[in-house]
Image (cartoon, grey):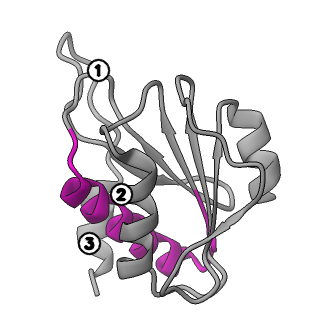
Amino acid sequence: MINQNTLQAFEIIPKKTDEAPQDPTVTFEDNYVEIRYPKAGVFTCKSIEETLHLAIDLCAMHRCRRILQKAEWPICHNEPRCIVDALGRVSTLPGLTFACCCDAHTASTADDESVPGSSGVRIRFFREREKALQWLGAK
């Protein structure tokens, strides 16, 4: 388990510079954790899993069960499968709800998808942030 000091280091919002951030940011909002992926990054299933692990630890620290992942494009070529597989491996929170919001998402899921091997984790993909937040029950 990652300690609080380590998590706080990952909660830092990138400084405003001319360079675009390369790493995702993981922050706690009012009652959910938000993962934001920058435009200029290259991400693999392994890096997605590492980011999800941080987000889940942050959820545990704040006693929440909601994660919103936001990107303006699909973050890797096999994104939906990577996310579902990673959540099944790293989720330690029963009843976790995960909304993946991507403006350019081509995949759509009409129903919630249960994550195999997890303790009741639900995931759903959205194009619009507000609909994702509403489904999460976050705002």
Q: Which label belongs to residue 34?
A: none
Rendered view: 91 above or below 38:
below
49 drawn magenta: yes
Write down the residue under mark 1: 16
Residue 23 location, x and y as percent? 23, 40
**Is residue 81 in sight in this rendering?**
yes
| Among the two numbered marks 3 and 1 on one chain, the one whose residue lies closer to the N terminus | 3
Residue 131 location, x and y as percent? 78, 39
Q: Is residue 118 left or right of residue 8?
A: right
Write down the residue under mark 3: 5
Q: Quadrant of the N terminus?
A: bottom left
Q: Residue at x 29, y 20 (%)?
A: 16
Tell me the distance, in whole angstroms, between the alpha carbons under discs 1 and 2: 30 Å
Write down the residue under mark 2: 82
- Give the crowd class for mark 2: few <14, some 14-19, many >=20 residues within 10 Å: some
Q: Secondary structure at mark 3?
A: helix
Residue furthest top in the image = 18
The magenta stretch is 43-67
